Amino acid sequence: MNFCPFTQRVRIVLKAKNAPHDIVNINLKNKPDWLSKVHPEGKVPALDTGDKVVVESLDIADFIDEKYPDPPLYPSDPELKSKDKEFIQKFGKVRGRYT
């Protein structure tokens, strides 16, 4: 795919965190057989941590934020952080052909 908003979300977080990473681009119209071993539903993004595979973009962003805490993705105030996460959950879902 030329553009997948979910993978772009992860790429933005990786870039903001300056986290070392490798990207494997997947043609979702012609998926490789090994993708089903990484993600049972054959979806992207998928992050292989070595110990486990994290598959939802928001979960991947949270994983990266924990592993690379600087700069933080969310404010340090728990109430503001909760509101930010709620906003992302509510409005972060992309509608259309990618869902």
Image (cartoon, rainbow, N blue to C red):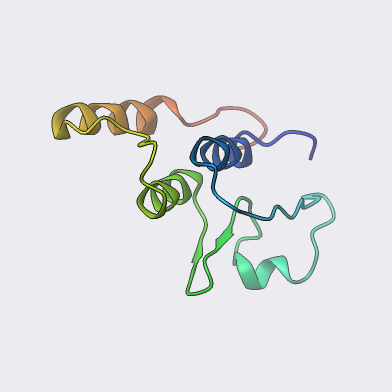
What percent of the width, then of the height, locates residue 27?
A: 81, 50
What percent of the width, then of the height, locates residue 86?
A: 29, 31
In the image, is 79 to the left or to the right of 30?
left
Quarter occupied by residue 82: top left
Q: Which residue is drawn at 45% across and 45% down?
A: 61
- Quadrant of the snapshot with the C terminus: top right
In the image, is 27 to the left or to the right of 98?
right
Quarter occupied by residue 78: top left
What percent of the width, then of the height, locates residue 68?
A: 41, 49
Q: Residue at x 36, y 46 (%)?
A: 69
Q: Which of 17 and 39 is in front in this view?
A: 17
Does 8 appear above or below 28?
Answer: above
Q: Which residue is drawn at 60% across and 40% down?
A: 11
Does 29 appear above or below 95?
Answer: below
Q: Which residue is drawn at 51% across and 45% down?
A: 57
In the image, is 54 to the left or to the right of 23?
left
Q: Nearer the viewer, residue 4 or 18?
A: 18
Does 27 appear above or below 34?
Answer: above
What percent of the width, then of the height, locates residue 64?
A: 44, 50
